Structures are given as structure tokens and as C-alpha cells.
Amino acid sequence: MKPKLLIFELWGLGDLVIATPFLHSACEKYSVTLVAKPYAQELQARLWPQVRIIPFVAPWTRFQGKYLLWQWPLLEMFRLRKQLANESFDAGISARWDPRDHLLLKLSRAHTRLGFPRLNSQMFLTHSLSKPAAREHRYEYWRVLGRALGLTLPPREAIPLPVARQEAVVLIHTGAGQPVRVWPLERYKSIVAWLRKKNFRVIVTCDADQREWWLRSGEADVATPRSVNELLALVDQASAFIGNDSGPGHLAAFCGVPTFTFFGPQLPEWFSPLHPQGVNLEGKPCPYKPCSDYCRFSVPRCLWNVNEEEAWVHIESFLNRHLRKVNGHTGDLGNLLDAQY
């Protein structure tokens, strides 16, 4: 019987996707239980069918009001603690340097508890690990944990991924977890028009709060996925993805779709999608970067100061390079598309 491994990844969709290579490797040696947001259950069938999911929305992962303790689901949290403690996990881990995760590990009574300590949270751990270098990608934290557990994870550029569809279909997703990560919709509309002029099929998808804007702008077929499964159905139609620093881009990358990502307050070297052919367009310099999701200005200048003409130059280069590689052509983008349509 395999030893039992408990994993906490309580944050966003992109964070769960970044953890995927670790989960694959861990399942070879351990019986894996993952505590994560409920949409992990939709990812399970596609990305890690051997992983058992315990859905839990940690109140401190809210963007606002996270420390209004009287609003916390205390009964649910007590039941979770009791459930985990009764399961006698051999090991428990978190890839975040988060004392709240480490306290949960302690309360789970996992025999061995590994993590990256912060604010003296090593008191909750049995093994404290050294963080990767400051500019390393989030994925490197999972590689450090893997080595500590005797697992071998490939470097980012060697992660095995499926092959995207070999058609000129671009999926554009204009949403993000927070407004400061959203490149202006008017500029996305210009990119959509240019792509269609180049004879691409473009699938426009957005968050629910953006839908009316797109409808008013004449995009009658804009998609607004209400679940991860609906998003996956759109990703499966695409040969390239364009979007903000957000979960859908990470999901597309791990499904084999090369990504073009607009980065604003965050750093691409920390959170770029895991596809080796992905391209990141970093926002303009700002003395306060990286500032996560709390911008001190009325709009995120780092991101909004990237205009559509500048973006198009990089997008066209990205699509030229990717389509030549996928289709085995060496001609320019216009010739390639003319041959396909």
C-alpha cells in the first residue's frame, strides 16, 4: 500500500495547473489527497485522475474581507480538521510560504510536514525547506518539494505537454482574477479585428462582468464559460491563446496550447504559463512592481500603457513562429493563412 500524502493548494486555477507535474509524479509513489477550491474536481478528470480531491474554500484566499473572522465558515473548517486528522496521513505539504497552510498541516496531524517557513511557521512543520531564488518561477517550489520527497520533476522547458490543434484558431480570454490584471477591452477588440482580417478564426471569451461590454461592441458569439469544463471545451478548439495573467492561460498552456500573456503588476518569471512556446508581454516599468493585485494608481499604468499597435507586433511574431512550427511551413503568416483558407 502506498503511503498517504496530503497536499494543500488553496488558491487559484493557475496555481493548481502549475502544481500538475508534481501531482503526476507524486501519484507514482503516494496515495495523494489534494485540498483545493471546488473547481479542482473539474480539473481532476483531465489533469490528475488518480488524485483524491477534498473541496475547501479557505476564507483567507478572498481578495477582500479575508480577515473578517466572524464571517469564516468555522463549522466547515472544524469538520475539515477532524476529517484530515482521522485519516493518518504519512506526509503533508504546501508549496506556499504561508503560515496558515502550515497551521492546517499541523492540525491535520500528518506525521511528516514539509514547507517553506515564514513568520516562525517552522513551529508547525517537521521539515523546513529553503525557498528557491527570489526570481524563480512558482513551479520551482514544487520541484524543491519533489526532491525532498524523493520525486523527480522535469525542468519547465521539458514538461511533457499534448500537441495543440493544427488550425488557425485563436482563443482570446479577456478576463482575470482582479481588474489590475486586465488589458483594456477596447484594445482586445482591435486585436480581434486584426486577427480576423488575417483570416484567423477567433473565439472571444470573457468573464461574466465583461459579457455585456462585448455584446454592446458587436461580438454576438462571445463565450462566457461558467465552469472549468466549459473553459476546457473552448481551449480544445484552439491552436493559440491570447489573454491576461490569469488561470485560463495556465490551463491552455498545460493543454498544449501556446500562450501569449499580457503581464502587468506581476512578474512573468514568477507566473508565466508552462508552455515552452509561450510568449509574455511585460507591462511598462513601475517603481512599485511587483505589486500583486493592489495598485496604488486609478488604473494599472504598467499594463494600460501597452497600446494595441505595440501588442500587435509581438502577437504577429508569436503566431508566425508558432504556426510555422506546427504546420511545417516556412512562409510568412499571410501566405500560410491564404493556403489554409
Image (tube, grey):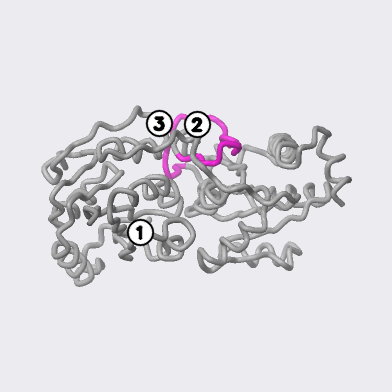
Q: Residue at x 60, y 60 (%)?
A: 206
Q: Earlier in the sequence, mark 3 or mark 2?
A: 3
Q: Element at badge 1?
A: loop
Whether 292 is among the magenta residues is yes
Q: What number of labels is visible?
A: 3
Q: Label 3, on which residue?
A: 136
Q: Earlier in the sequence, mark 3 or mark 1?
A: 1
Q: Nearer the viewer, residue 121 or 83?
A: 83
Q: Element at badge 3?
A: loop
x and y percentages locating residue 201 in the rendered image: 77, 55
**Local crowd at mark 2 within 10 Å, few (<14), some, or many (≥20)?**
some
Seen from this angle, which residue lies furthest bottom? 75
Q: Is residue 213 visible?
A: yes
Q: Label 1, on which residue?
A: 51
Quarter of the image for the N terminus: give it.
bottom left
Residues at circles 3 and 2 in contact by the CB criterion of under 8 Å: no
Q: Residue at x 15, y 44 (%)?
A: 125
Q: What whole-number distance in Å separates the C-alpha atoms at marks 1 and 2?
A: 41 Å
Amino acid type of the residue tagged 2 in the rendering:
Cys
Whether 59 is among the magenta residues is no
Q: Residue at x 24, y 53 (%)?
A: 5
Magenta segment: 271-296
Q: Is residue 155 left or right of residue 88?
A: right
x and y percentages locating residue 43 in the rendered image: 45, 60
Q: Earlier in the sequence, mark 1 or mark 2?
A: 1
Q: Nearer the viewer, residue 243 or 148?
A: 148
Q: Label 2, on which residue?
A: 286
Of discs 3 and 2, which sits in the foreground?
Answer: 3
Q: Element at badge 2?
A: loop
